[in-house]
Each structure stands twice: as C-alpha cells, then as structure tokens.
Amino acid sequence: MVFDSLDRIATATHIAFLVNPGDPRSASWAGEASWPKVKMPDRMLQVSPAAVRAVQDERPPTRFPALIVWVLAPDRQEIRNELLQAVFDGLNVDPQLYHRTLLAKWEFVNQVYALELLIRNPADYQEALEALRRGRATLRGKALLIEPTGG
C-alpha cells in the first residue's frame, strides 16, 4: 500500500483484514462473522463496507476493527524518525510503519511517511488519539479513520 496522499484513502468504500486463524493475535481484530470471507490455505481475507472520515476526539468509531491512517507531513523537521519514539512512548499502540528513501546530505535515509493504527476497541482509539495529540506539533500531517459500516 502506498500513501503518497490521502485522496485515495478518502474515497475508500471497504476495509479488509488478512486474518491468520492459527495466530491468537488475529482473533482479537478479525472482522465480524457477517463479513464476507475469502479462504486461503493458511489465512482468510475478511472484507466489509466502510466509511472514511477525519479522526475526531468526540466521534470514536462505533464498529470494530477500524483503522487510522496517519500520513505525516513531508516537510517536518526530523529525518531519521527520532520524534516517532516520543509520540508512542508508554502507549499501548503498535503502528504499522511505511517508509520512503530520502537523500539527505549525501546519505540515504528511510523516513517514515505514513502509519496505520489498528483500532480493536474504544481503549485503542483513546491511545491512538493520545499519539496523534503528541505528534500534532512535530510530525503534523493528517489522519483519517476507516471504520466498517456493516452492510
């Protein structure tokens, strides 16, 4: 997946999770039983219609699992992702990071340009909001919430 801009994400109509039934961690965020499934030899893909909107403190997702996609500001001050550690320090958030390679002062650097945050329940959403608050001034960017609508 490539998140160079939020345009494609903002028009998303479905959310999908690749679930490994043999991994107990997958069971905690697998979609509902009503979600259509595509079975493969060792895992299954679950898909649900979804809605996309900006992340808002007062409007947590009503269905789970949901996903926050945070595309960081490309012109932020950090190059080597040193500010990411401070944003997530002490929080129970496990971000999926997306990198791009930059040339900075004759050195190639893998900079994080986007993150996915899995939201399994209301507590996960509050932890993710805290990370977004911490990173608002330094990492900036925009965050969208993708949540299943159930249909």
Image (spheres, rainbow, N blue to C red):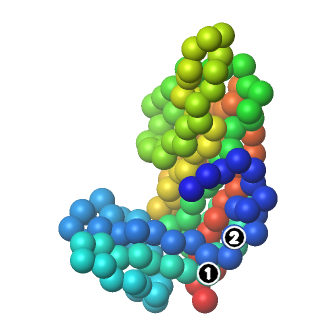
Mark drawn on residue 95 = none
* Residue farthest front in this picture: 106
Q: Amino acid at mark 1?
A: Pro
Secondary-structure class at tag 2 = loop
Mark 1 burial class by Cα count in 10 Å: few <14, some 14-19, many 20+: some
Q: Residue furthest left?
A: 22
Measured as percent of width and height from the top left, residue 73 is found at 74, 35
Residue 57 in view here: no
Q: Residue at x 48, y 46 (%)?
A: 96
Picture coordinates of residue 119, whole percent (x, y) = 52, 58
- Residue 12 disc label: 2
User: Is label 2 in contact with label 1 (beta carbons under 8 Å)?
Assistant: no
Residue 39 versus residue 124 in the image, above or below: below
Mark 2: which amino acid? Ala
Q: Secondary structure at mark 1?
A: strand
* Side of 107 relative to 59 (left or right): left
Whether 70 is drawn above or below 61: the answer is: above
Residue in the picture at 57% in, 72% down: 15
Crowdedness of circle 2 by 10 Å Cα count: few (<14), some, many (20+)?
Answer: few
If you read the primary sequence from the N terminus, does the residue marked by circle 2 or circle 1 appear first?
Answer: 2
Q: Quadrant of the C terminus?
A: bottom right
> How far from the left and from the top, in percent, is residue 140?
74, 34
